[in-house]
Image (tube, grey):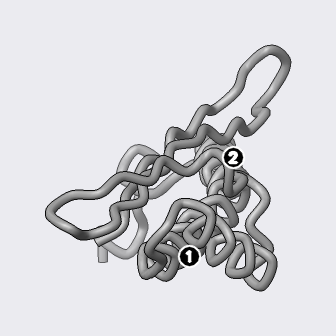
């Protein structure tokens, strides 16, 4: 019967202030994650467009294919003229690199550096 009545020192759990602190941290992480997610989706679209563009045989053709794919997938982070087109063993290789800045608070920014190349 003594176990039915617990004292305050025997209680376990999180206090209200602790819950607010944890909730604030989780909310901040979710806000930043919500800003990062669209950039990751756009990066995947860029990789897909670059892989399509590598089917071209000349630099203007590669850039035209990328431009058409970019218009369809709404790619705004990189322009066709910023692509680096090279040949390796009779295969066209398209490389790209761009940075994405996400404003956090005050003078603080999160910089994401995206790099890639065609298969």
Instruction: Estimate the x, y position of residue 8 in percent, counting from the top left.
Output: 48, 49
Badge 1 marks a residue whose secondary structure is helix
Residue at the spot x=20%, y=58% of the render? Answer: 88
In what quadrant of the picture does the N terminus appear? bottom left
Question: Is 63 left, or right, of 73 in this rendering?
Answer: left
Question: Answer yes or no: do the residues labelled 2 and 1 have beta carbons within 8 Å?
Answer: no
- Pick whichever of labels 2 and 1 is earlier in the sequence: 2
Front in this rendered view, residue 112 or 61: 61
- Residue at left offset 39%, top offset 55%: 116
Q: Residue furthest right?
A: 106
At x 40% / y 44%, what residue is drawn? 9
Question: Which is in the foreground here, disc 2 or disc 1?
Answer: 1
Q: Secondary structure at mark 2?
A: helix
The residue where tag 1 is placed is 49
Image x and y of residue 67, in percent: 72, 70
70 vs 56, nearest the viewer: 56
**Residue linked to disc 2:** 28
Instruction: Establish if 50 lies above or below 78.
Output: below
- Asked if 28 appears above or below 107 in the picture, the reply is below
In the rendered view of the protein, which quadrant contains the C terminus?
bottom left
Q: Is residue 13 left or right of residue 99?
A: left
Q: Is residue 38 left or right of residue 7?
A: right
For the point 61% across and 50% down, the residue is 29
Along the line of sight, the residue nearer the viewer: 60 or 18: 60
Residue at the farthest left position? 89
Q: Residues within 10 Å of mark 2 (few under 14, many from 20)?
A: few
- The Cα atoms of the two marked residues, 2 and 1, are separated by 33 Å
Total marks placed: 2
């Amino acid at each position: 019967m003594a176990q039915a009545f617990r004292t305050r020192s025997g209680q376990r759990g999180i206090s209200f202030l602790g819950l607010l602190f944890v909730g604030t941290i989780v909310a901040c992480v979710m806000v930043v994650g919500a800003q990062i997610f669209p950039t990751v989706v756009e990066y995947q679209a860029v990789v897909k467009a670059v892989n399509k563009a590598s089917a071209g045989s000349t630099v203007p053709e590669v850039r035209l294919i990328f431009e058409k794919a970019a218009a369809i997938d709404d790619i705004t982070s990189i322009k066709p003229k910023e692509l680096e087109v090279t040949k390796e063993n009779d295969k066209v290789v398209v490389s790209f690199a761009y940075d994405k800045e996400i404003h956090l608070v005050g003078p603080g920014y999160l910089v994401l550096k995206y790099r890639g190349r065609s298969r």
